[in-house]
Image (cartoon, rainbow, N blue to C red):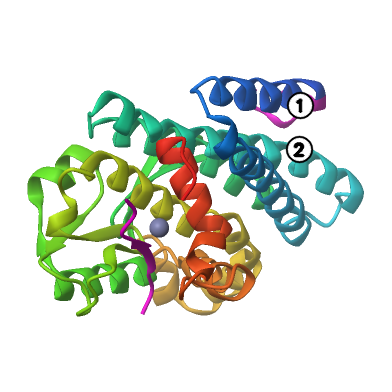
Amino acid sequence: MIFSVSKDKTKHNDSQVSKISIKRSVVYILIFSSTLSTPAQAQNYDIQSAIFNTVIGGIAGGIGAIINKKENEKCKKVFVKNFLIGAFGGAVMYGGKKTTSLIGVKHELGYAWLSRAIYNVGNSIVENAAANRKFGAIWHYDIGFIRLEYETQGKIFHTKVMPTSFSGMIYLAGTGKFDLKKSLQTGTPIFYTPIINHDTLIAAITSTNGLVFRSAFYNPYLYENIGHEIIHTYQFQDFSGFNTCLIPVSEKWKIRSPAYKKLSNWIYLDFNYEVMMFNYYILYGGNSGNKYYHNFLENEAQTLSSNKRL
Ligand SMILES: [Zn+2]
């Protein structure tokens, strides 16, 4: 089962992407995002989040690009270039997460669409760097278990199903009732139920790219909680750059199996969700007892969505 829990809380081609402009852009995004106001007690996690997203984007970009490099390319050059581009993408992802705070500030669920758009632009930049593709070669936007992809060179549009995310939606559908209105308002599948897993402490669960709420927490904590859970959906996507490590294997399978080649136009293997589970439960200790309040991913979700610590 794939979920994270919230508890009750009261240039467009390679040569044009210079190292300097990417470094500057990263700094501008971090400065712009930090102007969305953060009280001192939450600032520590805010800064950690900016660093975490930028570094993960850079590492995914650099390592992925080496795995996907062409034979005539040099490792060091490929790594450095795509590390910087990936770091830039990671900073944009941080900016997307931070934008969810507008949901609570403005009391308007529609800002979830904006934050997801910004996050997915950054995520697409990281994935292109990790695949050693041209900047902006593929843009994607994920809604629930559907990944909408646009290839700029061939002007090709793909609609792909993400299997792990789909399994998360099945869990949510089995746990609560679908809230069509809030799902449309946020661009995120949202379910609700009187009680989650017979546990009165659980306010909401994010399962891959959707979430289920305990009905009592729709009000008065609706905006703050939705922002928090939506950031969890992004956290599940944080490691998608590493999916590109499978590209060489996938390309071989396409040659061997015409059926797999056809299927790959409709399926996107989203192993990033499994990586997130490792990150949440193994690296950051999960959410049992007090571990919840010390889990970096919980603090990131809370700080960026509400400008407050857990
Ligand atoms: Zn949470």
Residue 277's place in the image compared with 233, above or below, is below
Name the quadrant where ligand 1 sits.
bottom left
Q: Which residues are magenta?
A: 1-19
> Where's residue 303, x and y in %?
49, 42
Tell me how far mark 2 sits from mark 1, CA to CA.
7 Å
Q: Type of residue at label 1? A: Lys
> Where's residue 20, x and y in %?
81, 22
Whether residue 6 appears in magenta in the rendering, the answer is: yes
- Residue 23, disc: 1
Seen in the image, is 42 located left or right of residue 191?
right
- Give the labeled residue for mark 2: 84
Q: Is mark 2 within 8 Å of ligand 1?
A: no
Label 2 secondary element: helix
Is disc 2 surrounded by few (<14), some (14 to 19) or many (20+) residues within 10 Å? many
Label 1 secondary element: helix
Q: Can residue 155 be seen in this snapshot?
A: no
Q: Residue at x 53, y 69 (%)?
A: 291
The tally of labels here is 2
Q: Residue at x 34, y 54 (%)?
A: 9
CB under 8 Å between callouts 2 and 1?
A: yes
* 152, 38: nearer the viewer: 38
Q: Type of residue at label 2? A: Leu
> Where's residue 142, x and y in %?
35, 49
